Image: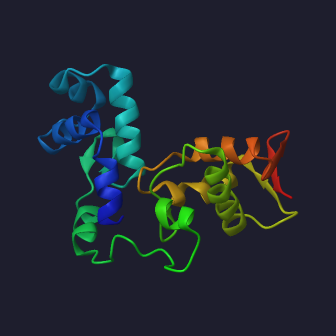
Amino acid sequence: MTAHALAGALADDGRRRIFAAIVLGATSATAVAQRTGLAARVVLTGVRRLTDAGLVTGADGALTVDEASLRAAARDSRPVNDAEPGGDPVLRTFLRGDVLVGLPAQRGRRRVLLAHIAERSFEPGTRYPERAVDEALKPWCAAGGSDHATLRRYLIDEQLLTREHGVYQRL
């Protein structure tokens, strides 16, 4: 996890409250909901996002802070903008290395970004099960700029990937 991914994971007020409750000793979603006053659904979603970001672990059903990830983020001295300087301005704006920091609202810009992700993540003609597609897209989402299901849906919508019977393919 990068320091940027850490900031992205904690950018939401609800996730900060959930994280704080876990730091202060809440070890279950029920305990987090009681301490924060948030709805159970919000807590479960927040815990999942914090876990995906590497901030929280749920080993043996007990929620804890992933201290090793936090230490690694503190040591990360990579500059915030490490995208290729001479590259496409859309990619410079929405990517930090190979991590998505946001999705453009404009369809044309979003398509440029999605085409880059598809090209870097999937070989043309290779068939991928949904699980493999999700695993290929999750690293792009480490900063919290989007989630892998949204990326997958946009890649299908923009016809950068095809889907038939749960099997995906880049044309």
Which part of the image, by quadrant, shows the C terminus? bottom right
Q: Is residue 14 above or below residue 101?
A: above
Of residues 44 and 95, which is closer to you in this image?
Answer: 95
Tell me if 149 is positioned left or right of 20 in this view: right
Residue 163 falls in which quadrant of the image? top right
Among all residues in the image, which is located at the extreme left?
A: 24
Residue 73: where, in percent of width, then height? 27, 67
- Up the image or down, 19 lies above or below 87; here it is above
Q: Residue visible at 17% across and 36% down?
A: 21
Q: Position of residue 37 (x, y in %)?
A: 20, 20
For this view, does 140 lie left or right of residue 10? Answer: right
User: Which residue is depicted at the point 28% across and 42% down?
Assistant: 63
Front position in the image: 136 or 8: 8
Q: Is residue 157 left or right of residue 1?
A: right
Give the colouring mode of the picture. Answer: rainbow
Q: Indicate the quadrant containing the N terminus: top left, top right, bottom left or bottom right.
A: bottom left
Is 115 placed left or right of 106 in the picture?
Answer: right
What's the residue at 57%, 75% (across, down)? 87
Q: Is residue 52 above or below residue 123?
A: above
**Residue sitting at x 59%, y 41%:** 150
In the rendered image, the vertical position of residue 44 relative to residue 109, given as above or below: above
Q: How many numbered circles does the render carry?
A: 0
